[in-house]
Image (cartoon, rainbow, N blue to C red):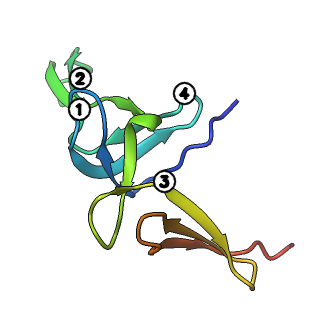
Amino acid sequence: MAKKIHVKKGDEVIVISGKDKGHKGKVIAIDTEKGRVFVEGANIIKKHQKARSQTAPSGIIEREGSIDASNVMLVDPKSGKPTRVGFKVNEDGSKDRIAKKSGAVIDTVKKAKGE
């Protein structure tokens, strides 16, 4: 079953534990099945690539590895510090993601038309 993850693709996050503790970066991709996120510039791994064709030569490629979603926190848009994520439902049915520390709105999810 897919796990609920508190960050979305494109969010600015900070790594709170592990070898890249304190690193800030954007979320590149999310794996909801495993509950892991890929953060730009964090957990760099080296992949030994075999040549696929003459245009794609062999070599050692550096790329981002995954980090457990519990090891990253969203960056507060006002203060730039790590914060938890909360939700607030508006009168029109739309839902806001808010930063718990400052109360700043991160983004808004519109209500579905069928409901």
Badge 3 marks a residue whose secondary structure is loop
* Mark closest to the chain's N terminus, 4 or 2: 4
**Rendered location of residue 39, percent (x, y):** 31, 42
Kindly indicate the quadrant of the structure image that contains residue 44.
Answer: top left
Question: Distance of mark 3 from mark 4, alpha carbons?
Answer: 15 Å
Residue pointed to by mark 1: 63
**Rendered location of residue 42, percent (x, y):** 23, 37
Residue pointed to by mark 2: 53
Is 64 above or below relative to 11?
A: above
**Of the residues shown, which amino acid type is indicated by label 4?**
Lys
Is 100 above or below relative to 8?
A: below
Question: Distance of mark 1 from mark 4, alpha carbons?
Answer: 19 Å
Question: Distance of mark 1 from mark 2, alpha carbons?
Answer: 20 Å
Tags 2 and 3 in contact by the CB under 8 Å rule? no
Kindly tell me whether residue 50 is visible in this rendering. Answer: yes
* Mark closest to the chain's N terminus, 1 or 2: 2
| Between marks 1 and 4 in the image, the one whose residue lies nearer the viewer | 4
**Of the residues shown, which amino acid type is indicated by label 2?**
Ser
Is 81 above or below relative to 103?
A: above
Badge 4 marks a residue whose secondary structure is loop
For residue 115, which numbered disc appears in the image? Answer: none
Quadrant where the image shows the C terminus = bottom right
**Rendered location of residue 74, percent (x, y):** 39, 54
Residue pointed to by mark 3: 8
| Between marks 3 and 1 in the image, the one whose residue lies nearer the viewer | 3
Crowd tier of the residue under label 3, counting other residues whose Cα lies within 10 Å: few below 14, some 14–19, many 20 or above: some
Badge 2 marks a residue whose secondary structure is loop
**Of the residues shown, which amino acid type is indicated by label 3?**
Lys
